[in-house]
Image (tube, rainbow, N blue to C red):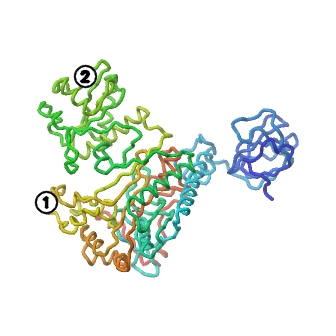
Amino acid sequence: MYRTHTCGELRSAQAGLTVTLAGWVQTVRKLSKSITFIDLRDRYGITQLLFGEELSQQLTENPLGREFVIQVQGEVTERTSKNAQLPTGDIEIKVSSYTILNKSMTPPFTIQDDTDGGDDLRMKYRYLDLRRQTVKKNLELRYAVNRAARNYLHENSFMDLETPFLIKSTPEGARDFVVPSRMNPGEFYALPQSPQTFKQLLMVSGYDRYYQIVKCFRDEDLRADRQPEFTQIDCEMSFVEQEDILSMFEGLIKYIFNTVKGIDYTDHVERMTWEEVMWNYGNDKPDIRFGMKLLNLKSAFTLGGKLTAHGELIKDAGFGVFDNAETVLAIAAPGCSEYTRKQTDELTEWVKRPQIGMQGLVYIKCNADGSLKSSVDKFYSEDKLKAIAEAVEAKKGDLILVLAGREERTRKAMSELRLEMGRRLGLRKENEFKLLWVLDFPLFEYAEEENRWVARHHPFTSPKPSDIGVMIENSPVIAEAEKYLEHPYNHIKANAYDMVLNGNEIGGGSLRLYQRELQEKMFAALGMTPEEALHKFGFLLGAFEYGAPPHGGIAFGFDRLCSILGGSESIRDFIAFPKNNSGRDVMLDAPSTIDDKQLLELSIQLNTSGRDSL
Ligand code: ASP
């Protein structure tokens, strides 16, 4: 028997017991000739070992190094000086004999929470990095989320069904990773970007509640903290309306909160339409742990005429920056009216950074005595400033920040500035979790470079019933590209929903199309000829002719959910073997070239020079 107990298990209640432990040497401290302490570590914790005179002598002759794997026998004894930091800190093992099970080279970095190893080194030796307590905690959390999700879904009659990884390439959205087929020369499989069509086919087959915690592969240009392979909690249900899906899956997330974090999320999960969140927060995944909503003083963005910009507040003042801007947006930062010149200058520099890309920042200080002072006093009387302050619901002591410029850039910039101010003011509290459903997304998005409509979610998403007619009756063709905003397709709403947690999209899904004619219409709207649609999705169109039930689903980004619950910005910390920011596995050194024999077998000839012309 290698061990009778783990290194995290023993307490003073076991004093007097003879035990065998096995694990890794964390530290060796030679106190004197006759006393050596060793901290022994395994997955469950750390136990202090005491080597007496005779064994200490052996250790001097034959030293144990860090990360040696050893087995020890000895007696559990109560410590004289206890360590309250360690669960096993009341005891130590008085070692009577030990065996070296395996030696270790000196590790390239210290296996400790505050390691001296840089990112690259830790990724190269990820198997050592994984021994560190902090990384282990993250993986334990990941497993807890996985288990909670499975329990909840199982209890609700969902069935875990596997779907293939070698499938057909149907690029729509991201690029596919492709896999050459040796047995079918010149032909390729693709790795699934998600099991979307399979889970829909399972609905056609009658498996009315499906789930899978599954890898997805997308060959995208890597943005910070994206992984080319990532994991989804992927779900689909039949005979459901949007409401059924929303309540089932807010139930899932609440269950995970409760089981994993002990949080009893009793708050009602807020719901906002896509239009509302774009208008009020400037992006489709707002952090609603704090207010600071955007005031639209001028906007090129129209929300079906429902919400209109407060244009009259800034007009006719002769201030060119506002007059010439497509959009002018304001927020009120609470309690910041006493910002010094240095601080407002610093904020101005912040919005001018290339990532934000604004030309400048206008501010209005709402002083504690009720007076107002702004950087545009030359153009706006105090009364006019007061009207703006009222509209943005600024209080005495607040600082109003205003950005002006092109529609999309200004909206993005203001949404970033809002988050930044929220962070600086401590309003984005780490232990506060706030869920939000964003509903009624647009069905289409216009891709200017391709001069065609693309599906905002994916081509299997259904329009709102009231918009089906608009899709059927109108041609997708746009005569004048710059007028796409006026095209009826621009106003079609989808039966699509996203779940947002603390400013991150953690899940998204939709009710699906399930009638062949409508699905064909959708493919046509996206610019596919009937032949192309058949070639790419003939299997699905065919299946829809054999009694496809109404269905819908959702997929959650499992890695991201774990990182948020773990209070980290980085999903890599929650993946056992992640890729780096250039999509490389530096431990395996992948991707890598393959030899000529393999290429020959695959009937592949490399043409690296051709790449530049792509
Ligand atoms: N398959 C979709 C995605 O990966 C999610 C869904 O619609 O269920 O985004």
Residue at 46% from the left image edge and 57% from the top image edge: 249
Report whether the residue tagged 1 is closer than 8 Å to ligand 1: no
Q: Nearer the viewer, residue 231 or 489?
A: 489
Q: Report the side of 262 relative to 599 (left or right).
A: right
Q: Quadrant of residue 447?
A: bottom left
Q: Which of the two marks, 1 or 2, is nearer to us in this view? A: 2
- Note whether 228 is above or below 84 in the view shown: below
Residue occupied by mark 1 = 480
Residue occupied by mark 2 = 373
Q: Report the side of 552 relative to 349 (left or right).
A: right
Q: Amino acid at mark 1?
A: Glu
Q: CA distance from mark 1 to mark 2?
A: 46 Å
Q: Nearer the N terminus, badge 1 or badge 2?
A: 2
- Note whether 179 is above or below 582 in the view shown: below
Q: Quadrant of the N terminus?
A: bottom right
**x then y, percent, for residue 10:** 77, 46
| Element type at mark 1 | loop
Residue at 71% from the left image edge and 45% from the top image edge: 46
Q: Amino acid at mark 2?
A: Lys
Q: Quadrant of the C terminus?
A: bottom left
**x then y, percent, for residue 502:** 43, 45
Q: Report the side of 62 relative to 237 (left or right).
A: right
Within the displayed image, which quadrant is ligand 1 positioned in? bottom left
Q: State yes or no: discs 1 and 2 in contact (Cβ < 8 Å).
A: no
Residue at 16% from the left image edge and 63% from the top image edge: 478
| Element type at mark 2 | strand
**x then y, percent, for residue 417:** 33, 38
Crowd class of label 2 (few under 14; some 14 to 19; many from 20; radius 10 Å): some
Q: Nearer the viewer, residue 200 or 34?
A: 200
- Report the residue that reaches farthest toward the top: 369
- Note whether 425 is above or below 23 in the view shown: above
Q: Point out which mark residue 143 bears.
A: none
